[in-house]
Protein backbone atom coordinates (compact mmCIF):
# COMPACT_ATOMS: atom_id res chain seq x y z
CA UNK A 1 0.00 0.00 0.00
CA UNK A 2 1.23 3.45 -0.83
CA UNK A 3 1.91 5.56 2.21
CA UNK A 4 0.92 9.17 1.99
CA UNK A 5 3.53 11.90 1.99
CA UNK A 6 1.45 14.21 4.16
CA UNK A 7 2.09 12.05 7.22
CA UNK A 8 5.82 12.34 6.61
CA UNK A 9 5.55 16.10 6.40
CA UNK A 10 4.03 16.20 9.84
CA UNK A 11 6.76 13.95 11.19
CA UNK A 12 9.44 16.33 9.91
CA UNK A 13 7.76 19.16 11.72
CA UNK A 14 7.53 17.00 14.84
CA UNK A 15 9.59 18.97 17.37
CA UNK A 16 8.13 22.28 16.25
CA UNK A 17 4.61 20.90 16.39
CA UNK A 18 5.26 19.44 19.82
CA UNK A 19 6.30 22.83 21.07
CA UNK A 20 3.20 24.39 19.56
CA UNK A 21 0.98 21.76 21.15
CA UNK A 22 2.55 22.28 24.55
CA UNK A 23 2.01 26.03 24.23
CA UNK A 24 -1.55 25.55 23.02
CA UNK A 25 -2.21 23.28 25.99
CA UNK A 26 -1.23 26.24 28.13
CA UNK A 27 -3.99 28.15 26.30
CA UNK A 28 -1.65 30.05 24.01
CA UNK A 29 -3.99 30.99 21.18
CA UNK A 30 -1.21 32.04 18.82
CA UNK A 31 0.30 28.59 19.04
CA UNK A 32 -3.05 27.06 18.34
CA UNK A 33 -3.51 29.35 15.33
CA UNK A 34 -0.26 27.98 13.94
CA UNK A 35 -1.47 24.42 14.55
CA UNK A 36 -4.66 25.26 12.66
CA UNK A 37 -2.61 26.55 9.75
CA UNK A 38 -0.49 23.38 9.71
CA UNK A 39 -3.33 20.89 9.91
CA UNK A 40 -6.37 22.42 8.26
CA UNK A 41 -5.61 21.35 4.68
CA UNK A 42 -5.08 17.75 5.65
CA UNK A 43 -8.17 17.64 7.84
CA UNK A 44 -10.31 19.20 5.16
CA UNK A 45 -9.04 16.77 2.53
CA UNK A 46 -9.90 13.79 4.74
CA UNK A 47 -13.33 15.17 5.58
CA UNK A 48 -14.03 15.92 1.94
CA UNK A 49 -13.21 12.36 0.93
CA UNK A 50 -15.32 10.86 3.68
CA UNK A 51 -18.32 13.10 3.29
CA UNK A 52 -18.24 13.81 -0.44
CA UNK A 53 -19.66 17.23 0.20
CA UNK A 54 -17.72 20.49 0.36
CA UNK A 55 -20.01 22.24 2.84
CA UNK A 56 -20.24 19.33 5.21
CA UNK A 57 -16.49 18.79 5.02
CA UNK A 58 -16.02 22.44 5.89
CA UNK A 59 -18.41 22.10 8.83
CA UNK A 60 -16.70 18.95 10.08
CA UNK A 61 -13.26 20.57 9.85
CA UNK A 62 -14.45 23.68 11.61
CA UNK A 63 -16.15 21.75 14.41
CA UNK A 64 -13.09 19.56 14.84
CA UNK A 65 -10.71 22.46 15.30
CA UNK A 66 -13.03 24.44 17.54
CA UNK A 67 -13.53 21.35 19.70
CA UNK A 68 -9.78 20.77 19.67
CA UNK A 69 -9.20 24.25 21.09
CA UNK A 70 -11.96 23.87 23.67
CA UNK A 71 -10.69 20.46 24.84
CA UNK A 72 -6.99 20.96 24.26
CA UNK A 73 -6.40 20.07 27.88
CA UNK A 74 -7.62 16.54 27.13
CA UNK A 75 -4.30 15.70 25.52
CA UNK A 76 -2.02 13.66 27.74
CA UNK A 77 0.85 13.25 25.31
CA UNK A 78 1.64 16.24 23.03
CA UNK A 79 3.18 13.86 20.49
CA UNK A 80 -0.23 12.29 20.00
CA UNK A 81 -1.84 15.59 19.01
CA UNK A 82 -2.28 14.60 15.39
CA UNK A 83 -3.84 11.25 16.25
CA UNK A 84 -6.16 12.97 18.71
CA UNK A 85 -7.15 15.51 16.08
CA UNK A 86 -7.88 12.72 13.61
CA UNK A 87 -10.12 11.06 16.16
CA UNK A 88 -12.04 14.29 16.64
CA UNK A 89 -12.37 14.65 12.89
CA UNK A 90 -13.65 11.09 12.46
CA UNK A 91 -16.18 11.77 15.19
CA UNK A 92 -17.28 15.00 13.50
CA UNK A 93 -17.55 13.19 10.16
CA UNK A 94 -19.75 10.52 11.76
CA UNK A 95 -22.09 13.23 13.01
CA UNK A 96 -22.14 15.06 9.70
CA UNK A 97 -22.74 11.84 7.78
CA UNK A 98 -25.57 10.93 10.11
CA UNK A 99 -27.15 14.30 9.54
CA UNK A 100 -26.58 13.99 5.81
CA UNK A 101 -28.43 10.68 5.55
CA UNK A 102 -31.73 12.49 5.47
CA UNK A 103 -30.76 14.84 2.69
CA UNK A 104 -27.84 13.66 0.64
CA UNK A 105 -26.51 15.97 -2.03
CA UNK A 106 -24.29 14.51 -4.69
CA UNK A 107 -21.22 16.34 -5.84
CA UNK A 108 -19.33 15.30 -8.89
CA UNK A 109 -16.43 16.79 -10.77
CA UNK A 110 -17.22 17.20 -14.45
CA UNK A 111 -14.45 15.96 -16.68
CA UNK A 112 -14.39 17.84 -19.92
CA UNK A 113 -13.68 15.52 -22.84
CA UNK A 114 -12.46 17.03 -26.05
CA UNK A 115 -13.94 15.05 -28.97
CA UNK A 116 -10.76 15.53 -31.01
CA UNK A 117 -8.41 13.95 -28.44
CA UNK A 118 -7.41 10.28 -28.58
CA UNK A 119 -9.55 7.78 -26.71
CA UNK A 120 -8.57 7.58 -23.02
CA UNK A 121 -11.79 5.93 -21.96
CA UNK A 122 -10.18 3.12 -19.95
CA UNK A 123 -8.55 5.23 -17.16
CA UNK A 124 -11.48 7.66 -17.13
CA UNK A 125 -13.89 4.77 -16.81
CA UNK A 126 -11.85 3.40 -13.91
CA UNK A 127 -11.92 6.73 -12.14
CA UNK A 128 -15.64 7.04 -12.72
CA UNK A 129 -16.24 3.54 -11.45
CA UNK A 130 -14.16 4.24 -8.36
CA UNK A 131 -16.03 7.47 -7.82
CA UNK A 132 -19.42 5.80 -8.06
CA UNK A 133 -18.41 2.72 -6.11
CA UNK A 134 -16.77 4.69 -3.33
CA UNK A 135 -19.65 7.12 -3.06
CA UNK A 136 -22.15 4.31 -2.63
CA UNK A 137 -20.31 2.92 0.38
CA UNK A 138 -21.54 3.64 3.90
CA UNK A 139 -19.78 6.49 5.72
CA UNK A 140 -18.29 3.88 8.10
CA UNK A 141 -16.69 2.10 5.20
CA UNK A 142 -15.50 5.30 3.57
CA UNK A 143 -13.91 6.45 6.84
CA UNK A 144 -11.93 3.26 7.25
CA UNK A 145 -10.79 3.23 3.61
CA UNK A 146 -9.72 6.88 3.71
CA UNK A 147 -7.79 6.45 6.94
CA UNK A 148 -6.04 3.35 5.70
CA UNK A 149 -5.45 4.11 2.02
CA UNK A 150 -5.31 7.90 1.87
CA UNK A 151 -3.90 8.91 5.25
CA UNK A 152 -1.79 5.80 5.20
CA UNK A 153 -2.42 4.77 8.77
CA UNK A 154 -1.40 1.31 9.87
CA UNK A 155 -4.16 -0.83 11.33
CA UNK A 156 -3.28 -0.01 14.93
CA UNK A 157 -3.45 3.75 14.32
CA UNK A 158 -6.68 3.32 12.38
CA UNK A 159 -8.07 1.42 15.36
CA UNK A 160 -6.98 4.26 17.65
CA UNK A 161 -8.61 6.85 15.42
CA UNK A 162 -11.87 4.92 15.39
CA UNK A 163 -11.75 3.89 19.03
CA UNK A 164 -12.17 0.24 18.04
CA UNK A 165 -10.23 -2.96 18.68
CA UNK A 166 -7.76 -3.85 15.97
CA UNK A 167 -9.64 -7.06 15.13
CA UNK A 168 -12.80 -5.11 14.45
CA UNK A 169 -10.87 -2.71 12.25
CA UNK A 170 -9.41 -5.61 10.26
CA UNK A 171 -12.80 -7.13 9.63
CA UNK A 172 -14.36 -3.77 8.78
CA UNK A 173 -11.56 -2.96 6.39
CA UNK A 174 -12.02 -6.32 4.74
CA UNK A 175 -15.76 -5.77 4.41
CA UNK A 176 -15.25 -2.24 3.05
CA UNK A 177 -12.78 -3.34 0.37
CA UNK A 178 -15.01 -6.25 -0.50
CA UNK A 179 -18.00 -3.90 -0.83
CA UNK A 180 -16.01 -1.51 -3.01
CA UNK A 181 -14.86 -4.34 -5.24
CA UNK A 182 -18.40 -5.66 -5.53
CA UNK A 183 -19.61 -2.25 -6.63
CA UNK A 184 -16.81 -1.91 -9.15
CA UNK A 185 -17.63 -5.36 -10.53
CA UNK A 186 -21.29 -4.47 -10.75
CA UNK A 187 -20.47 -1.26 -12.61
CA UNK A 188 -18.13 -2.94 -15.07
CA UNK A 189 -20.71 -5.59 -15.96
CA UNK A 190 -22.28 -4.73 -19.37
CA UNK A 191 -25.93 -3.66 -19.19
CA UNK A 192 -28.72 -5.18 -21.23
CA UNK A 193 -29.14 -3.88 -24.78
CA UNK A 194 -31.92 -1.36 -25.07
CA UNK A 195 -33.94 -3.61 -27.42
CA UNK A 196 -34.15 -6.40 -24.84
CA UNK A 197 -35.43 -4.16 -22.10
CA UNK A 198 -38.40 -2.88 -24.08
CA UNK B 1 -7.31 -5.00 -1.26
CA UNK B 2 -6.31 -8.27 -2.77
CA UNK B 3 -5.48 -6.82 -6.18
CA UNK B 4 -2.26 -4.75 -5.94
CA UNK B 5 -3.10 -2.89 -9.14
CA UNK B 6 -6.46 -1.86 -7.83
CA UNK B 7 -4.80 -1.04 -4.53
CA UNK B 8 -2.50 1.43 -6.25
CA UNK B 9 -5.24 2.76 -8.50
CA UNK B 10 -7.51 3.33 -5.55
CA UNK B 11 -4.81 5.12 -3.54
CA UNK B 12 -3.93 7.26 -6.54
CA UNK B 13 -7.57 8.05 -7.11
CA UNK B 14 -8.02 9.09 -3.48
CA UNK B 15 -5.08 11.46 -3.73
CA UNK B 16 -6.35 12.84 -6.99
CA UNK B 17 -9.85 13.22 -5.64
CA UNK B 18 -8.79 14.90 -2.39
CA UNK B 19 -8.81 18.66 -2.32
CA UNK B 20 -5.29 19.81 -1.50
CA UNK B 21 -6.32 23.06 0.13
CA UNK B 22 -9.04 24.05 2.51
CA UNK B 23 -11.36 26.82 1.26
CA UNK B 24 -10.09 30.35 1.64
CA UNK B 25 -11.21 31.97 4.81
CA UNK B 26 -11.95 28.73 6.67
CA UNK B 27 -8.80 28.94 8.77
CA UNK B 28 -9.42 32.61 9.54
CA UNK B 29 -12.99 31.85 10.55
CA UNK B 30 -11.84 29.06 12.87
CA UNK B 31 -9.16 31.25 14.41
CA UNK B 32 -11.69 34.01 15.00
CA UNK B 33 -14.14 31.60 16.62
CA UNK B 34 -11.57 29.94 18.82
CA UNK B 35 -10.34 33.35 19.96
CA UNK B 36 -13.81 33.87 21.43
CA UNK B 37 -13.94 30.38 22.96
CA UNK B 38 -12.54 29.67 26.37
CA UNK B 39 -10.81 26.27 26.63
CA UNK B 40 -12.23 23.92 29.22
CA UNK B 41 -10.09 23.10 32.24
CA UNK B 42 -8.75 19.56 32.33
CA UNK B 43 -10.97 18.43 35.18
CA UNK B 44 -14.09 19.10 33.12
CA UNK B 45 -13.00 16.81 30.30
CA UNK B 46 -14.09 13.15 30.65
CA UNK B 47 -11.08 11.89 28.71
CA UNK B 48 -8.83 13.12 31.48
CA UNK B 49 -10.73 10.94 33.93
CA UNK B 50 -11.02 7.85 31.77
CA UNK B 51 -8.22 6.57 29.61
CA UNK B 52 -10.59 5.51 26.84
CA UNK B 53 -11.61 7.83 24.01
CA UNK B 54 -14.99 8.78 25.40
CA UNK B 55 -16.06 11.01 22.53
CA UNK B 56 -15.94 8.35 19.86
CA UNK B 57 -17.51 5.74 22.11
CA UNK B 58 -20.37 8.03 23.00
CA UNK B 59 -20.87 8.75 19.32
CA UNK B 60 -21.22 5.04 18.63
CA UNK B 61 -23.92 4.51 21.25
CA UNK B 62 -27.41 4.90 19.76
CA UNK B 63 -29.01 8.15 20.81
CA UNK B 64 -32.22 6.37 21.86
CA UNK B 65 -30.27 4.26 24.32
CA UNK B 66 -28.68 7.34 25.84
CA UNK B 67 -32.11 8.92 26.15
CA UNK B 68 -33.57 5.85 27.87
CA UNK B 69 -30.61 5.71 30.26
CA UNK B 70 -31.00 9.40 31.04
CA UNK B 71 -34.72 8.95 31.74
CA UNK B 72 -33.99 6.00 34.03
CA UNK B 73 -31.43 8.05 35.87
CA UNK B 74 -33.86 10.93 36.33
CA UNK B 75 -36.56 8.53 37.55
CA UNK B 76 -34.19 6.86 40.00
CA UNK B 77 -33.02 10.21 41.34
CA UNK B 78 -36.62 11.40 41.70
CA UNK B 79 -37.64 8.30 43.64
CA UNK B 80 -34.54 8.50 45.82
CA UNK B 81 -35.13 12.18 46.48
CA UNK B 82 -38.76 11.60 47.35
CA UNK B 83 -37.87 8.73 49.64
CA UNK B 84 -35.22 10.79 51.43
CA UNK B 85 -37.62 13.71 51.66
CA UNK B 86 -40.18 11.47 53.32
CA UNK B 87 -42.83 11.75 50.63
CA UNK B 88 -42.65 8.04 49.96
CA UNK B 89 -42.71 5.62 52.84
CA UNK B 90 -41.57 2.10 52.26
CA UNK B 91 -43.75 -0.05 54.50
CA UNK B 92 -42.06 -2.85 56.35
CA UNK B 93 -43.15 -5.36 58.88
CA UNK B 94 -44.27 -3.45 61.95
CA UNK B 95 -44.88 -4.97 65.34
CA UNK B 96 -48.53 -4.68 66.26
CA UNK B 97 -49.13 -2.27 69.05
CA UNK B 98 -51.73 -2.91 71.71
CA UNK B 99 -54.97 -1.19 70.84
CA UNK B 100 -55.92 -1.12 74.47
CA UNK B 101 -54.49 -2.22 77.79
CA UNK B 102 -51.34 -1.35 79.67
CA UNK B 103 -48.03 -0.75 77.98
CA UNK B 104 -44.63 -1.84 79.24
CA UNK B 105 -44.76 0.75 82.00
CA UNK B 106 -47.98 -0.80 83.22
CA UNK B 107 -49.90 2.45 83.28
CA UNK B 108 -53.36 2.71 81.83
CA UNK B 109 -54.16 5.96 80.03
CA UNK B 110 -57.71 7.28 79.87
CA UNK B 111 -59.66 10.46 79.16
CA UNK B 112 -61.05 12.56 81.98
CA UNK B 113 -62.41 16.10 81.73
CA UNK B 114 -60.89 16.57 78.30
CA UNK B 115 -57.41 15.65 79.58
CA UNK B 116 -55.33 12.47 79.52
CA UNK B 117 -54.94 10.72 82.86
CA UNK B 118 -53.08 7.60 83.90
CA UNK B 119 -53.79 5.02 86.51
CA UNK B 120 -51.90 2.03 87.93
CA UNK B 121 -53.16 -1.42 86.86
CA UNK B 122 -54.61 -1.97 90.34
CA UNK B 123 -56.70 1.22 90.09
CA UNK B 124 -54.55 3.34 92.36
CA UNK B 125 -52.49 6.43 91.69
CA UNK B 126 -54.75 8.32 89.34
CA UNK B 127 -53.02 11.42 88.06
CA UNK B 128 -53.19 13.71 85.01
CA UNK B 129 -50.58 13.02 82.32
CA UNK B 130 -51.62 15.60 79.73
CA UNK B 131 -53.47 18.59 81.05
CA UNK B 132 -53.33 21.12 78.24
CA UNK B 133 -55.89 23.74 77.28
CA UNK B 134 -58.57 22.40 74.94
CA UNK B 135 -59.66 18.81 74.55
CA UNK B 136 -57.40 15.74 74.57
CA UNK B 137 -58.71 12.26 73.88
CA UNK B 138 -58.09 8.78 72.45
CA UNK B 139 -54.70 8.14 74.09
CA UNK B 140 -52.54 5.23 73.03
CA UNK B 141 -49.26 4.08 74.55
CA UNK B 142 -46.34 2.88 72.56
CA UNK B 143 -45.39 -0.72 73.22
CA UNK B 144 -42.48 0.21 75.48
CA UNK B 145 -44.52 2.81 77.34
CA UNK B 146 -42.24 5.76 76.67
CA UNK B 147 -44.51 7.56 74.19
CA UNK B 148 -48.15 8.35 74.09
CA UNK B 149 -50.20 9.57 71.15
CA UNK B 150 -53.54 11.31 71.36
CA UNK B 151 -55.77 13.72 69.53
CA UNK B 152 -56.12 17.33 70.55
CA UNK B 153 -58.48 20.17 69.63
CA UNK B 154 -59.34 23.57 71.01
CA UNK B 155 -63.07 22.88 70.86
CA UNK B 156 -65.14 19.78 70.27
CA UNK B 157 -65.86 20.98 66.73
CA UNK B 158 -62.22 20.40 65.86
CA UNK B 159 -60.08 20.41 63.88
CA UNK B 160 -58.35 17.53 65.63
CA UNK B 161 -54.59 17.36 65.63
CA UNK B 162 -52.51 14.35 66.39
CA UNK B 163 -50.03 14.87 69.18
CA UNK B 164 -47.21 12.60 70.30
CA UNK B 165 -45.82 13.06 73.76
CA UNK B 166 -43.90 11.53 76.58
CA UNK B 167 -43.08 12.39 80.16
CA UNK B 168 -42.79 16.14 80.28
CA UNK B 169 -43.03 16.86 76.59
CA UNK B 170 -45.40 16.78 73.65
CA UNK B 171 -45.15 17.60 70.00
CA UNK B 172 -47.78 18.08 67.37
CA UNK B 173 -47.45 15.85 64.34
CA UNK B 174 -45.97 17.83 61.46
CA UNK B 175 -47.43 15.70 58.70
CA UNK B 176 -49.93 18.35 57.56
CA UNK B 177 -53.35 17.05 56.60
CA UNK B 178 -52.39 13.51 57.46
CA UNK B 179 -52.28 14.50 61.09
CA UNK B 180 -55.57 16.30 61.07
CA UNK B 181 -59.07 14.91 60.84
CA UNK B 182 -62.73 15.14 61.86
CA UNK B 183 -63.98 13.90 65.19
CA UNK B 184 -65.30 10.57 63.91
CA UNK B 185 -61.85 9.62 62.61
CA UNK B 186 -60.11 10.15 65.88
CA UNK B 187 -58.39 7.00 66.96
CA UNK B 188 -54.72 6.40 67.66
CA UNK B 189 -52.47 3.43 67.62
CA UNK B 190 -48.78 3.69 68.31
CA UNK B 191 -46.39 1.12 66.85
CA UNK B 192 -42.70 0.45 67.02
CA UNK B 193 -40.36 -0.04 64.13
CA UNK B 194 -36.67 -0.70 64.55
CA UNK B 195 -36.60 0.99 67.89
CA UNK B 196 -38.38 4.12 66.65
CA UNK B 197 -41.89 5.10 67.46
CA UNK B 198 -44.34 5.78 64.74
CA UNK B 199 -48.00 6.62 64.90
CA UNK B 200 -50.04 4.05 63.04
CA UNK B 201 -53.63 4.20 61.97
CA UNK B 202 -54.06 7.66 63.34
CA UNK B 203 -56.49 8.50 60.61
CA UNK B 204 -58.52 5.33 60.63
CA UNK B 205 -62.26 5.67 61.07
CA UNK B 206 -63.66 4.27 64.26
CA UNK B 207 -64.61 0.64 63.91
CA UNK B 208 -61.95 -0.37 61.40
Image (cartoon, coloured by chain):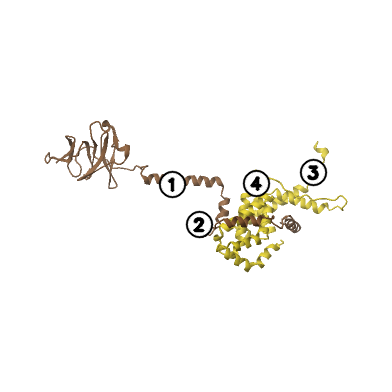
- Vertical placement of B19 versus B203: above or below? below
Find residue B33 and report its image quarter: bottom right
Looking at the colours in the rendered structure, which chain would you say is drawn in yellow? A
Are the residues at dot 1 and dot 2 in contact (C-beta closer than 8 Å)? no
Res. A197 visible in picture: yes
Q: Are marks 4 and 1 on the same chain?
A: no
Apparent side of residue A129 relative to residue A16 in the rendered image (left or right): right
- In three-dimensional space, the C-alpha distance between marks 4 and 2, rounded to whole angstroms, equals 30 Å
At numbered mark 3, what does the secondary structure look like: helix, strand or loop? loop
Res. A167 visible in picture: no
Q: Which residue is mark 3?
A: A191
Q: Residue furthest left?
A: B124
Name the spot of residue A196 as percent of width and height, x first: 82, 38
Q: Earlier in the sequence, mark 1 or mark 2?
A: 2
Residue, x 78% and y 52% (percent of image)?
A126
Q: Which residue is mark 2?
A: B44
Front tag of 1 and 2: 2
Name the spot of residue A195 as percent of width and height, x first: 83, 38
Q: Which residue is mark 4?
A: A100
Q: Which residue is mark 1?
A: B77
Apparent side of residue B42 relative to residue B155 in the rendered image (left or right): right
Q: Colour of chain B?
A: brown
Q: Earlier in the sequence, mark 3 or mark 4?
A: 4
Q: Chain of mark 1?
A: B
Amino acid sequence: MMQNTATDAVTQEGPMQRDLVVRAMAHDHEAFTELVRLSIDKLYAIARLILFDADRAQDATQKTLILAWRDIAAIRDPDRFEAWLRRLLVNACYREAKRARKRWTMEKDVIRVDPGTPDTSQPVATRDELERGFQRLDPDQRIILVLHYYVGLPLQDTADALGLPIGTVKSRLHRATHALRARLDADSRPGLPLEQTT
Amino acid sequence: MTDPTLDRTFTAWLEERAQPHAPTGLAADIVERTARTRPRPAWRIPERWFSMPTTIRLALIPRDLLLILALWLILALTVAGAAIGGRITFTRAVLPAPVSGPAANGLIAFERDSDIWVVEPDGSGERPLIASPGIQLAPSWSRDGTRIAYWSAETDAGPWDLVVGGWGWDRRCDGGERCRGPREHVRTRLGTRRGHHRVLGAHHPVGR
